[in-house]
Image (cartoon, rainbow, N blue to C red):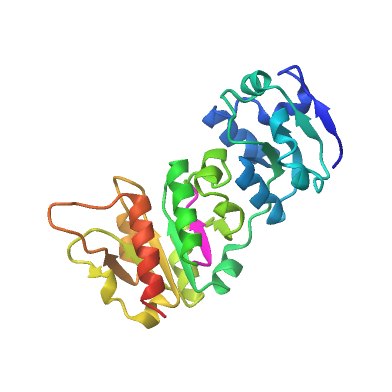
Amino acid sequence: MAGVVTVDDPADPRVADYVALTDVELRRHREVAEGLFVAEGEKVVRRALAAGHVPRSVLLAPRWLDRMADVLATVDAPVYVAAEDVLERISGYRVHRGPLAAMHRPALPDAGELVRAAGRVLVLEDVVDHANVGAVFRTAAAFGLDAVLLSPRCADPLYRRAVKVSMGAVLTLPWTRLPDWYAAPDLLRDAGLTVLALTPAPDALPLPAVPGEVLRRCALLLGTEGDGLSRHWQDAADLRVRIPIAAGVDSLNLAAAAAVACYAATIGSP
């Protein structure tokens, strides 16, 4: 541990990484530009460090020092300690889940290399809600998918809320953005993956009817809440598939649809 430093002034430049954490627009641009992300809470910070993410600093209240002592002893970065009211003035909200850690943002892997090494991947189109992105990552990790691919307009998986909702899954499950969104179907097929577009359309093939050999190497495509997957991706897919649901219910929300699709892909291809 580089050393414990007490911070009394919310304007202290040493804790600038943690200022205004609730300002989504500010953080969305700043964190990417400055190459950082923030992990929040004891479990998430522990998982980030265990996954090899490199901290820039840690910020926590005095009551967390003993509980985090084992982890802090391994951190080669400043550890800042601030009273609860100072933490709130720095971050913009009442921090009660444990420590905050500013981490160096890792470089994204090449999309082609990622999918060539994968069996099943989840692809998200224009999912702009950070909580939805985090929930999908948690689901994909739970069912053993190999990677998540994002369209250019998807929300940042390393934004604090996405990391928290995913319970740290965004820190361990490989992911990247697809730079050429319209060429992505060919990239997936060239890697040997069958492209499956999830849609509630009644003329789509029921997901349980998809052959197991297809599900062993596939890309499951999901669109945003409301509009769903675009017509372009439905037309570009190898198969349009749907989750059978009761009459009178038009669709599932994104997190539920992702969970069912991942489960179906897993049990359908033993």
| 143 to the left or right of 1 | left
Quarter of the picture containing the C terminus is bottom left
Say how many tags the image has: 0
Quarter of the picture containing the N terminus is top right
| 90 to the left or right of 268 | right
Q: Of residues 231 and 51, which is closer to you in this image?
A: 51
**Residue sticking out furthest to the right:** 2
Q: Which residue is painted at 80% across and 45% down in the image? A: 75
> For residue 147: magenta?
yes
Read off the magenta span.
145-152
* Residue 173 versus residue 85 in the image, above or below: below
**Residue 207 visible in the displayed image:** yes
Q: Which residue is painted at 50% across and 49% down in the image? A: 152
**Residue sticking out furthest to the left:** 248
Q: Which residue is painted at 26% across and 63% down in the image? A: 243
Q: Of residues 264 and 99, which is closer to you in this image?
A: 99
Image coordinates of residue 114 in percent, x first then y, are 58, 67
Residue 109, located in which quarter of the rendered image? bottom right
Image coordinates of residue 183 in percent, x first then y, are 47, 63
Image coordinates of residue 106 in percent, x first then y, are 68, 51
Image coordinates of residue 257 in percent, x first then y, are 33, 56
Q: Which residue is painted at 51% across and 61% down in the image? A: 141
* Residue 64 versus residue 114 in the image, above or below: above
* Residue 170 versus residue 243 in the image, above or below: above
| 145 to the left or right of 114 | left
> For residue 25: magenta?
no
**Residue 156 visible in the displayed image:** no
